[in-house]
Amino acid sequence: MLKQWIESQQQAVYLLVDLLSQPELLPLFCRQGGEDAQPLFQPAEFEEHKEKGPWLLPLSQLIKKDPDILTEYSSLAGIWLSSAHSPEAVSKHLQSLLLAIYEGEAVLFRYYDINVLAPFLSSLTVTKQEEFMGPYSSPCHGA
């Protein structure tokens, strides 16, 4: 299913990963020649947690070089996204979702966790889903 989803994309493909639950993903990405991984915990309030938080891994170039690379990632959980927008625009939007207001307080919203995103999106109207999704297409919840 994941391979079919990726092959159907006409835009850049990214993997949104939570390094707290899968710390091996970033080193794997770098070993395979991946570049431009972007930590989403860049704002000052998250800087000390950057290495354990969500990262956006641009995979389009790696997949073009080696389509079999997906076998390395297939057993690892993450949220696959595609977007026609720049990696910076996608990253900026994802960063804007990190804090949510709950009972008057700003709290971390772990939307980058597959177990949080799927039920959250299903609770929204189509219009709200599109607003939340911003500059990227419907995610594919890979596992």
Image: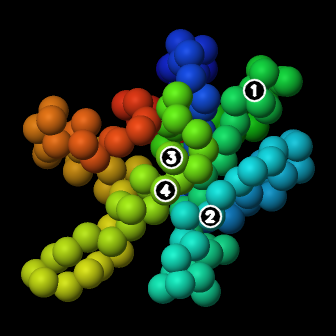
Earlier sequence position, callout 1 versus callout 4? 1
User: Tag 1, which secondary structure?
Assistant: helix
**Residue 9 image offset from top left, x and y in percent:** 54, 18
Could you tell me how far apart the alpha carbons at marks 4 and 3 are, in whole angstroms? 6 Å
Q: Tell me, for residue 90, which label it has, or none.
A: 3
Q: Tell me, for residue 39, which label it has, or none.
A: 2
- Tell me, what colour scheme is on the image? rainbow
Could you tell me how far apart the alpha carbons at marks 3 and 2 are, in whole angstroms? 12 Å
Earlier sequence position, callout 1 versus callout 2? 2
User: Tag 3, which secondary structure?
Assistant: helix
Task: Please say if the residues under marks 4 and 3 sit with CB atoms less than 8 Å apart.
Answer: yes
Left or right: 69 with respect to 20? right
Q: Tell me, for residue 63, which label it has, or none.
A: 1
Q: Amino acid at mark 4?
A: Lys
Left or right: 13 with respect to 113? right
Label 3 or label 2, whichever lies nearer to me, is 3
**According to the image, label 4 marks what residue?**
92
**Residue 17 image offset from top left, x and y in percent:** 57, 54
Could you tell me how far apart the alpha carbons at marks 1 and 3 are, in whole angstroms? 19 Å
Q: Amino acid at mark 2?
A: Pro
At x 35%, y 61%, the residue is 97
At x 75%, y 26%, the residue is 63
Earlier sequence position, callout 1 versus callout 3? 1
Label 1 or label 3, whichever lies nearer to me, is 3
